Image (cartoon, grey):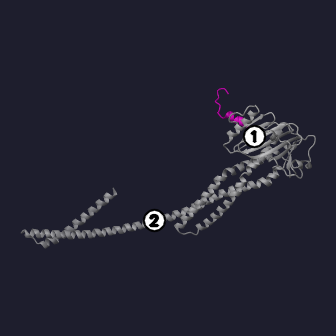
Amino acid sequence: MPGLREHPLRRTLTDEVHARPYEMMPPPARGSFIALHSGEAASRDDWTAVGDLCQRYGVSAPPEGASHYSVDLGPFRLRWERHTEFSSYGFLKYGAFAAPFADPVIGEVPSEWLASLPGEALVAIHVAVEDRRGGQRDLAELAPLFSGNTVAGSVVAGGAAKAWTDYRLHADGFSRLLVEDLDLRVRQVGRLVQRLVEIETYRTLALMAFPEAQHYGQAVTRIDEHLAELTQRVTEINNLEDEQRLLLELSRAAAEVERIAATTEYRFSAARAYYALVTRRISELREERVQGIQTFNEFMERRLAPAMRTCESVSDRLRALSYRVGRTGSLLRARVNVALEQQNRDLLESMNRRARQQLRLQETVEGLSVVVLSYYSVGLVGYLAKAVKASGAPIDTDLVTGLSIPLVIAAVFIGVRSLRRRLIREETL
């Protein structure tokens, strides 16, 4: 692109469209597929394990940071894919075989290497692809291949193949999947096998949420009943202390709801995503019914769909419960706030009354102070007049004392008032 600047993600995004291609599986072919749940932090360990296996057989290891790899190791072909929380490994072998599940490919994989893989086995499937263009198995021939278990299956890929499984674990811990090629192209075989394996893988991963739904469903019911009781009590209490105690109980219930929601949110969200993938992969099979046999879609509708509805129900109840707890808490907090505001108003009114009483008392004390000070001041004036008269001045002491009374009272009143104003001014600074 001369003269154009390329976006740094352009090539990565273009390559992502072509990532994880289907395997070419010319029938007859067999495979053993396992999915190990290792969490989101184990991608480096998976990459290292795949590199170790490649080194054993003298082939190139996957590039640094790869999340999928397919390589021929000689005795078998390896297909590895790293997903968000699990890794899948496929071990494939092409060529004729005597019986579909008598000699599984995983028997040729080094056992010590398998034991060293990070994570725990969640899915394990033996797959056999038969070329049945010359003739098809009848239902009686299918039964021994699945240990006499009830078989589910259908005509798939627009009539180009048949697929059968019993969705059970056999003595070796693996389930079994048989594909009869009636008119498939080589690439269609690999695509069909991958879809069938993914249906089983995503079905199992989706069901990981079911035990949590069963466990926490009881807790949700208990909290729901407790919330109904608390809501009823909201209408019955009539004092602030009970309201505050009830608000504390509501806060505890809210904390419990949020704890459960935080614990289950990832698993429930993952279950919804995995279930959507299962339904999509089944629709891509383009099933046609075989008389008397349960189809893949019917099996999932009867077995997986109810479990997913249970998970969805618990998730919905948690969301509704969180909303109800919050709404009830808001209502109760509003009542508590109103009660506290009323208490504050009562307290302020009481303080105002006391302030007015203190003001009246202060004014009374000021009046008494003026009287007392005036009384003693007039007495001092009388003593002063007597002293002047004793010195020979011709004055009437009683007249002087009497005339001084209004002057003394006025002077004392003005002095006390001035003092009070000065004190008030100093307090406000």
Depth order, front residue of 410/244: 244
Give the magenta range. Answer: 1-17
Q: Residue at x 91, y 49 (%)?
A: 139
Depth order, front residue of 46/368: 46
- The percent coordinates of residue 188 (x first, y second) are 83, 39
Considering the numbered disc 2 on the image, is that residue within a helix, a strand or a loop? helix
Depth order, front residue of 52/402: 52
Instruction: Judge left or right: residue 405 versus residue 34.
Output: left
Depth order, front residue of 174/389: 174
Question: In this view of the protein, can residue 18 be seen by the observer?
Answer: no
Q: Which residue is mark 2?
A: 345
The quarter of the image holding the C terminus is: bottom left
Instruction: Judge left or right: residue 275 versus residue 153.
Output: left
Question: In this view of the protein, can residue 20 be seen by the observer?
Answer: yes
Give the residue type at disc 2.
Arg
In the picture shown, does residue 365 fall above or below 257?
A: below
Q: Are marks 1 and 2 in contact (CB under 8 Å)?
A: no
Considering the numbered disc 1 on the image, is that residue within a helix, a strand or a loop? helix
Q: Which residue is mark 1?
A: 112
Q: Nearer the viewer, mark 1 or mark 2?
A: 1
